[in-house]
Amino acid sequence: MSLLNEADAQRSQYFDLRRYIGKTEILDSAKLRVDYSLSYIRDTLNLSKISRDRKVLLIGDKINKFYSYYVQESDSVLTADWNKGKNSARVKRSPDILGEGYELYCNYPEGKRTIVNSITSLSVYKYEEDVENPRWVIRSETTVILGYFCIKATGRIGARDYEVWFTPSIPIQLGPWKLAGLPGLILKAYDTKKHYTFECIGIEQLKQKQPIVMPQWAYINTTKEEYKKNERQFYNDYVTALLSLGFNVNITDGEGNRKISLETPNRYFADRNISHSTNIDERDRYKKLPYNPIELE
């Protein structure tokens, strides 16, 4: 396994489990479900390596939720096994499928957006932000997507320029991620560098309304600025970040033998007689992980 693949495998294990599996809070009921495929590039130095996710937009009377189908599927399996008192095996998928862990709750609280995101399995962050839509310019180009007449628009958000296609046939001012505010549902969107591409793969008018729920993890309540700072630290120096977040880190040689044991200074879990450890190959100890988030600085 190459160093890059080892780093990918290490990163994915930190996102696979959540810190707490428990109750859920019902925020609203969805009347419409929109599914998107997402193709994205995590490493700008390796543009040929494309990761994939499946996103779901649940549209309720007051609140909308945008999340990863694959991450929710993994969490559901883990929760079911947790309730049965047994450990859960990771859901097996194609290597190119890497679900993004964030969840967006729009108009929750009213007029704002709540973001839930994970850096590691011990750190599930939650913060609020104002809802700001891109300043769209509607263009003259048109196309047909899934049988719907669509119009092109361009705009900028999260330090990326986007081209999107929306359909006036579904007069809902929403779309994938934070792409919203046009006079119709956005069915396709991509930034101009093609690092992130969303394509609608299904629209379902729900016969029975689906609850829009927020899982109750052991959240770290924070601000967007503090979250982004911690996220950058993880990708720039993930061993130090893991130690600060509660992991004990074992540095191993090329054959997996332990050479150095680093103990976390975070006493939260140790004081409760709970231990979390992970192994890092010595060749990757000071390696930076690829960092290309959808929302740039």
Image (spheres, grey):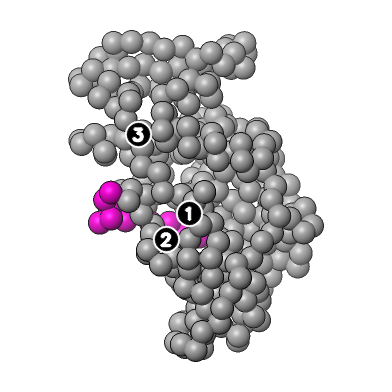
Q: Which badge, 2 or 3, comes first in the chain's sequence?
A: 2
> Would residue 207 appear left or right of 3 to someone viewing this image?
right
Task: Estimate how packed mark 1 is, as few (under 14), some (14 to 19) or many (20 or more) residues with alpha carbons within 10 Å.
Answer: some
Q: Which residues are magenta?
A: 45-55
Tag 3: amino acid:
Lys
Q: Which badge, 1 or 3, comes first in the chain's sequence?
A: 3
Location of residue 133 by image quarter = bottom right
Q: Which residue is mark 1?
A: 294
Q: In the image, is residue 123 above or below residue 52?
A: above
The circle on residue 196 is: 2
**In what element is the residue under mark 2?**
strand
Q: Is residue 48 magenta?
A: yes
Q: Residue at x 33, y 10 (%)?
A: 260
Q: Residue at x 46, y 11 (%)?
A: 263
Give 144 or 292, whichever is nearer the viewer: 292
Q: Which residue is mark 3?
A: 288
Question: Residue 91 at x, y = what percent?
Answer: 41, 44
Q: Could you tell me how many numbered marks the image carries? A: 3
Name the front one of labels 2 and 3: 3
